[in-house]
């Protein structure tokens, strides 16, 4: 890989990380009072659109310098830019949440996860009302719900007491990169095909 290519990938990766840092800042500012619907729109839909737009845009820009751009090349550029970007994001989140606002992080995410559990309770109640559960089955479902909710509460109590830890977001990064690799492979198929199509016309 030439020096210019390395600089291009590094610069775009750093830019991606800085762009994605907008989302934890939004979470810090509005997360505590954000509804689940808005949370899904911002942190799943909007996040996916922003991330996809930039990595595909930069991959095509990179590919434009080559006459041929294989799946392997497309995947490599997509994933390396993403890995650098998420590395920057992880450092930023650690500085923001682990060292600056750890209590706020726990408060926001505990409330959010409990809200998801409340939705599950509503589903159970509706199913029971419609006759999907017998009385015993309903009680079993409520018991499972209560156990899960208690485990969730205990988890956040431990984090609140012991702190997030310096490797908390690094551990999350490892899992995220696994799924990002799969997503980059899917995007690489489209980038490769589109580039080949352009070159043959």
Image (spheres, helix red, strand yellow):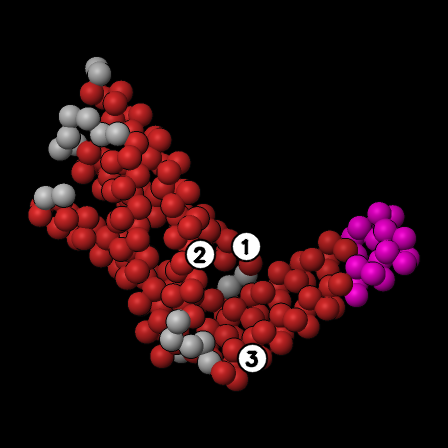
* Callout 3–callout 1 Cβ contact below 8 Å: no
Residue marked by disc 2:
175
Local SS, label 3:
helix
In front here: 19 or 192?
192
> Which residue occupies 22% across, 30% down?
69
Instruction: Tell me if mark 2 has few (under 14), some (14-19) or many (20+) residues whose alpha carbon lies within 10 angstroms of its own.
Output: few
Residue 102, image x, y percentages: 43, 78
Q: Give the range drawn in magenta.
A: 125-143
Residue 194, image x, y percentages: 29, 26
Residue marked by disc 3:
158
Q: How many labels does the image show?
A: 3
* Callout 1–callout 2 Cβ contact below 8 Å: no
Of callouts 3 and 1, the N-terminal one: 1
Q: How many angstroms separate mark 3 from mark 2 (CA)?
A: 22 Å
Of callouts 1 and 2, the N-terminal one: 1
135 part of magenta stretch? yes
Local SS, label 2:
helix
From the viewer's perspective, tell me whether residue 186 is left or right of residue 157: left
Q: How many angstroms separate mark 1 from mark 2 (CA)?
A: 25 Å
From the viewer's perspective, tell me whether residue 136 is left or right of residue 51: right
């Amino acid at each position: 890989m030439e020096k210019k290519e390395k600089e291009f990938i590094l610069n775009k990766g750093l830019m991606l990380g800085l762009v994605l840092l907008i989302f934890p800042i939004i979470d810090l500012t509005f997360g505590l009072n954000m509804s689940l619907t808005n949370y899904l729109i911002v942190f799943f839909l909007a996040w996916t659109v922003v991330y996809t737009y930039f990595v595909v845009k930069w991959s095509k820009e990179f590919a434009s310098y080559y006459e041929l751009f294989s799946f392997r090349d497309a995947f490599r550029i997509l994933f390396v830019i993403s890995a650098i970007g998420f590395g920057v994001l992880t450092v930023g989140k650690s500085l923001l949440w682990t060292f600056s606002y750890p209590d706020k992080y726990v408060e926001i995410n505990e409330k959010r996860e409990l809200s998801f559990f409340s939705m599950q309770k509503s589903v159970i109640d509706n199913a029971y009302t419609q006759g999907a559960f017998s009385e015993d089955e309903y009680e079993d479902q409520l018991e499972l719900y209560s156990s899960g909710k208690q485990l969730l509460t205990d988890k956040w109590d431990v984090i609140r007491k012991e702190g997030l830890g310096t490797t908390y977001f690094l551990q999350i990064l490892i899992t995220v990169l696994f799924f990002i690799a799969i997503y980059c492979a899917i995007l690489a198929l489209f980038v490769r095909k589109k580039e080949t199509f352009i070159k043959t016309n």
